[in-house]
Amino acid sequence: MALEFAQHVRRIPAYPAADGYALPEDVAMLASNESPFPPLPAVVEAARRAVETANRYPDPTNGRLRAALADRYEVPAERIAIGNGSCDVLLAAGEALLEPGAEVVYAWPSFSVYPHLAAATGATAVTVALDAAARHDLDAIAEAVTVATRLVVVCNPNNPTATVVGLDALAALVERVPRQVCVIVDEAYCEFNVREDPDASLALLREHPNVALLRTFSKVYGLAGLRVGFALCGSTELREAVDQVRQPFFCNVAAQAAAVEALRHQDEVTRRVEQTIAARLELEEGLRHLGFDPSESQANFVWFELGEDRPGEPRDEAAIVRGLAERGVLVRAGAALGREGALRVTCGSGAENGRFLAALGQIM
């Protein structure tokens, strides 16, 4: 007789993890929006020293890390939530806020974890289509909010389309959302946005206790393998609720130590952002040379529609992804991210980007 599982287990979609982790090293890993830059030596050393004390549990309060983040962002430490990656904080917020009869509103296509929020809690997901430029339609999102809405999520820059909405428009959305509804702005890629100061959104926290900014060390700090993220909250209530619904010790000793050290090297962060933006521009130029029209990226990846071979005959997304893999290049298929007929490609090293463009050119 088979085991019987809770109904919500059957509702939760499988996360579309990228392929390639068991492949040889000679592969251009451009599928998961990771940084091509390894952690700084000082960050590696901090993690190594922390592992020497791994016989003890990590600090359950994440005190040093929260203090370092409070100093960096000028947000009180008691309003900073730490997680095993930003997804951990997001899913915990869903558990704390949502239940059957409640609603969560977000754009689609957007981050692949968002469907888990409703599926895991029994809430109703209300999805809003992106506009013609693959950006969030903030007016439509505001209109989708009802008396049942508990949570609104805005991914900015949006994953997978790499597009952004401006702070003024975002602030206008928050003004329209009732104060009892939590608004989470998922800013995993905000440091790569050149249209506005990445920290401009901090102003929202000073005026709106129902807002939280979700950020991560996985991207710009190059610590994806250690899994550490955080939320800057407009009030203490969300941070307390997020911590209450999770297991204790949710951020390990190496992750805490590495993140604290990484925050000390903002000049290097700036340098790596500049290099990533240069790589992004090269990728976009290369794609245009091949006849594609990528969206206006403000992230560390690019997104583009594959178009048609001839009128009425869309290009075969699966065949193109397979052809790239055969040439040692891994990218993400749009079908796995909510929109078939497109590709998402991480900005890698110069050699990796060149390899991708050459491979795509051969396939075309």
Image: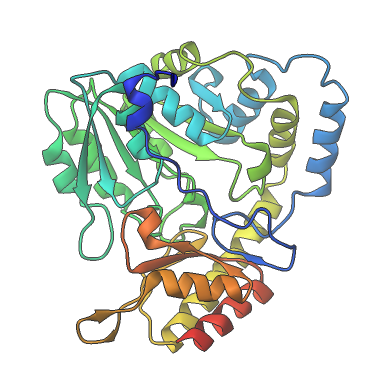
Q: Is residue 6 left or right of residue 54?
A: left
In the image, what residue occupies the spot 51% across and 81% down?
A: 360
In the image, what residue occupies the spot 44% across and 61% down?
A: 298
Query: In front: 185, or 323?
Result: 323
Residue 76 image position (x, y, % from top left): 52, 21
Outermost front residue: 1
In the image, what residue occupies the spot 55% across and 40% down?
A: 216
Query: In front: 248, or 279?
Result: 248
Could you tell me if residue 221 is visible in this image?
yes
Q: How many discs appear?
A: 0
357 shown above or below 181: below
Colouring scheme, one of rainbow, by chain, secondary structure, one colour: rainbow
In the image, what residue occupies the spot 60% across and 54% down?
A: 34
Residue 128 image position (x, y, % from top left): 20, 47
Residue 42 image position (x, y, % from top left): 83, 43
Residue 190 image position (x, y, % from top left): 47, 50
